[in-house]
Image (tube, rainbow, N blue to C red):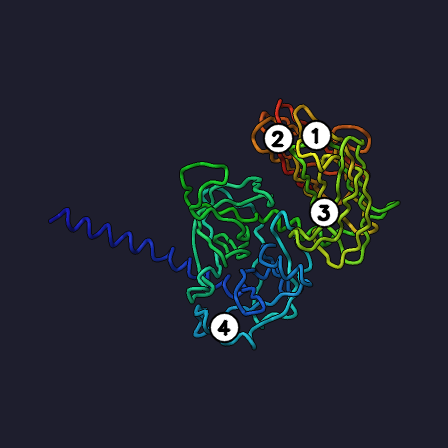
Amino acid sequence: MKHHLSAIALAAAALLSAAPAARADREIYLRVAPASVAFVNGNGRVLGTGVLIDAVERLVVTANHVVNQPVAKGRDVRVFFPVLKDKRVVTEAAFYKNNQAKLLIPGTVIAYDYVRDLALVRLARIPEGVAAVPLAKEDPSPGDTVHVIGNSTEHWGGAFGYNKGYVRNSFHWAFVPRCFYALSHHSPTNHGDSGGPVVNDRGELVAVVSTGTDGDPNPAGWTKRQQVVDHSVHVREIRAMLANLKKPAYQFPGGPSFSITTTVNRSRADDLFFVQVQKGEKVKLDLAGKGATDLDLFADLCDEKHAVVAKTGTSDKEKATLTPDWTGVCRVRVLNLPKDLENKDSLTPVNGYTLTVQWTAANPGPVTVMRGIMEKATDEIKLYYEAGKGEARVALIGDGDTDLDLFVIGPDGQEVGKGVTLADREVVTWTPAVSGVYTVRVQNLGGVFNRYVLTTD
């Protein structure tokens, strides 16, 4: 009998101790949910979620893949905020479906990053009294509690749902075509939650939902299924995107440029470069090979459907001028082909080339490179950085087959940073002391091919 009473007392104590935590979770939800939005398509179907981060500027942050199709069609989007009744959020999807005509608010995508899966939207207006969710001042740590709000149950009839989990870790994550600094956590998310806020116990934004594993087989080929782990876009990437909006345009002769000098062979034929463009600002593309093969040059809106450049001559020297009718990301492709296309047995030999992308005026912003580097080879990437604009960062992630090293050389020829561990994941950060062209070198120390992703800030 004594033991029985002790068990009851322990159970009661556990319930009492859990009550404050439950109330705290509810308070977090009631604080963050009113600042969340649902993105809808032309048929009123929910595409994903976002969160208001600046009430004065009416800025909403979301995942790029939520607004990717609207961007391709003109950058206009539509959202609705949750409605509160009796101090409770209405979570019936049918209510919002039936009232969309008066709830929908138009907005425009003002910045997006295809590779980092991040976008900023400026709304025409926001509901009265809605407070923005502040960005976290401190980075989250493993073990921290996170709270997630999203719309993954919309197709079942629910809206603005809540979930809770814990931070696992933070790291540079890449699974083509996405590459970003990720917050990995155990708060399950699904289709419709994308772009939704991930907040800490103080209600501060630490990430936005991007990619989950949802139990599917590992893409690397593991036979075992994974437990649910989500890779959300870390608040560091959000801070960087906001900072890039405030940077003035670079002013120097010819405009800013990006160039890469590298080699390709027959089995690694498709190199991808994601560059920022601005509507109406001309971008010059110049591809120059060494004559060994036929190189073709393409550019599109990252969807293989909206081609804006297609230079498919028979040489390896192609030039084009692009005048984009959108502001955002353009994908430039270099394709290596045999000169004798009719001969199916024709081998494509190694060819070296230099690709230059030159902007006429605006700050080019981040650049992402996705390509294969041959054994014992070195890629040289040149970018302009301006002094006094804060910290710069280059991140490199390989496929794991070889050791890749990363070096950054300043305009004066002096090394300003390097990553030389025994792995093929390296990060170099530095604060440019002088304005000018910096050289980023990627070296493959192994005896086999390695495919890598390199991102710059």
Contact, CB < 8 Å: mark 3 with mark 4?
Answer: no
**Mark 3 vs 1, N-terminal side:** 3
Contact check, label 1 and label 2, Cβ < 8 Å? no
Separation (CA) of disc 2 from disc 4: 49 Å
Among the two numbered marks 1 and 4 on one chain, the one whose residue lies closer to the N terminus: 4
The residue labelled by disc 1 is: 407
Query: Can you identify the residue that label 2 sits on?
Result: 450
**Mark 3 or mark 2, which is nearer to you?**
2
Residue 397's place in the image compared with 207, above or below, is above
Query: Relative to 211, does residue 393 appear above or below in the rendering?
Result: above
| Whole-number angstrom distance, CA of label 3 to CA of label 1 | 21 Å
The answer to which of marks 1 and 2 sits earlier in the sequence is 1
Residue lying at 49% horizontally and 56% vertically, measured from the top left: 191
Q: Position of residue 227 (x, y in %)?
A: 41, 43
Q: Which mark is residue 275?
A: 3
Q: Earlier in the sequence, mark 3 or mark 4?
A: 4
Q: Are marks 3 and 2 in contact (CB under 8 Å)?
A: no
Mark closer to the observer (2, 4)? 2
Q: Earlier in the sequence, mark 3 or mark 2?
A: 3
Which of these two is toward me, 182 or 336? 336
Residue lying at the far front of the rendered structure: 342
The residue that label 4 is drawn on is 97
Q: Residues within 10 Å of mark 1 (few under 14, many from 20)?
A: many
